[in-house]
Amino acid sequence: MHPADHIRGTKSDKLKGRKVVLGITGSIAAVECVKLCRELIRHGAEVHVVMSKDAQTIVHPYSMAFASGKPVTTEIDGRVQHVALCGDVPDKADLLLIAPATANTISKIACGVDDTPVTTFATTALGSGIPVIVVPAMHGTMIKHRAVTENIERLRGMGVRVVEPRMEEHKAKMPDTDHIVSCAILVVGKNDLKDRRVLVIAGATEEPIDDIRVVTNKSSGETGVEMARAAYERGASVDLWMGRCDVEIPSFLNTTRYSTFKDLQELVQGVQHDVVFFPAAVSDYSPAKSEGKLSSDKDSVTVTLKRNPKLIDGIKAKVVVGFKAQAKMAEDALVAEAKRLQERSRCTFVVANRIEDVQKGRTKVLVVAGSGAPHRLEGTKSQVADRVIDIVVRIL
């Protein structure tokens, strides 16, 4: 077994059974392609790599052969690899992903020129109707060239998905690997939330005790990020409202930050979405805030807490998914808590778990709806989020 097979599907099966051709051209960003290839495999993809001559001066084909577990195409020969993988043939590739794409490659594809292995694959893929994603990477002055910008728009007109680069240090840099992988999943995925508006409310509130100190909780926000990512990858228009969190928020998610209970209370007045996920850890109580800083010289300090209303109770949408987290509680008691939440808030169903069943990146949950038996889900948070989306899609 090749080492690539040991990691296949370890993060999710969103690309299981999908054949992805990764085209690499001569940008210095090609150094990121080993990581990109491995991430595609971790989501289940079978990856085949094709490289231009210039790309081979930056990343050796041996590296990509190791990363993919497949022979690397460095020139078109008698095997006619462009036809075998991207032609109008049985078992053709599901996606051609060109990352990084130089100004030279972009302009050649836009004009139908195919004088490198990568551009030959692109011409064949576009002719056979295979989806194509292009990820530009070049110096900032190059992407501002009128001909390059026009050729990018020309590609979009051909149905090519162009992933916007990060403009940093006067350069058009490839976005992070997670962004590119999520775009690949979106393009070849189920798209069963297309034209749906999804809101994810996540993270922890921070309630001020004084002008310096706050009361908060241990929520990492990771579940909310994975719910938002999963909805995006299924074609939804996603809004993420995020409080305090310990995880990186993907740059491609439309994110609004909040801090306190009052901040979130104001935000929920504007909910106009088809689906709402509410994994946020909202403070049940808020302290009466003191001005300035409470003295640290006293042996004890009394903080008075005032109960907050349950914000989920007022949210209206076609589907509202509540979340209930508990600690050191028997399963039957946890299910009872989830049912009480569902009855009180009239949410569609509740995802419940115990904090001791949560690890970084992994979780075990119960999906509770009505009087039926709870449905158990376990795996990476990405896998569990995707299964929860499956339930929502069936309801819609």
Image (tube, rainbow, N blue to C red):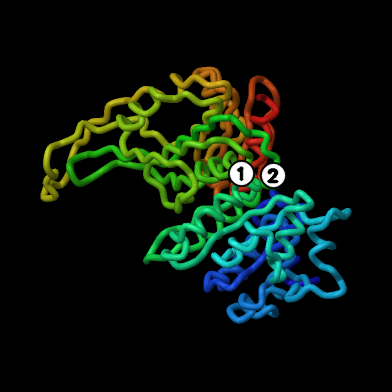
Q: Residue at x 54, y 47 (%)?
A: 356
Name which residue type carries label 2: Gly
- In percent of width and height, residue 219 lies at 43, 44
Disc 2 is placed on an element classified as loop
Above-or-below relation of 36 to 230: below
Left or right side of 65 for 224: left
Q: Secondary structure at mark 1?
A: helix
Report the side of 17 relative to 200 (left or right): right
- Say above or below: 6 vs 357: below
Above or below residue 137? Residue 233 is above
- The residue singled out by tag 2 in the image is 189
Instruction: Give me the residue at 54% from left, 30% from top.
Output: 197
Residue 297 position in % (x across, y down):
11, 50
Sequence-wise, the earlier of marks 1 and 2 is: 2
Q: Nearer the viewer, residue 354 or 91?
A: 91
How far apart are labels 1 and 2 at the CA level?
Answer: 7 Å
Crowding at dot 2, Cα within 10 Å, few <14 / some 14-19 / many 20+, comes out as: some
- Quarter of the image where the C terminus is located: top right
Residue pictured at 60% horizontal, 29% vertical: 335
* Residue 363 x %, y %: 59, 47
Q: Amino acid at mark 1?
A: Glu
Horizontal placement of 36 versus 344: left or right?
right
Visible residue check, residue 390: yes
User: Which residue appears at 87% of the width and 55% of the height?
Assistant: 89
Q: Which mark is residue 377?
A: none
In the rendering, at what x and y percent does residue 299 appear? 15, 47
Whether residues under marks 1 and 2 lie with C-beta atoms below 8 angstroms apart, the answer is yes
Q: Which one is nearer the viewer's eye here, 161 or 359?
A: 161
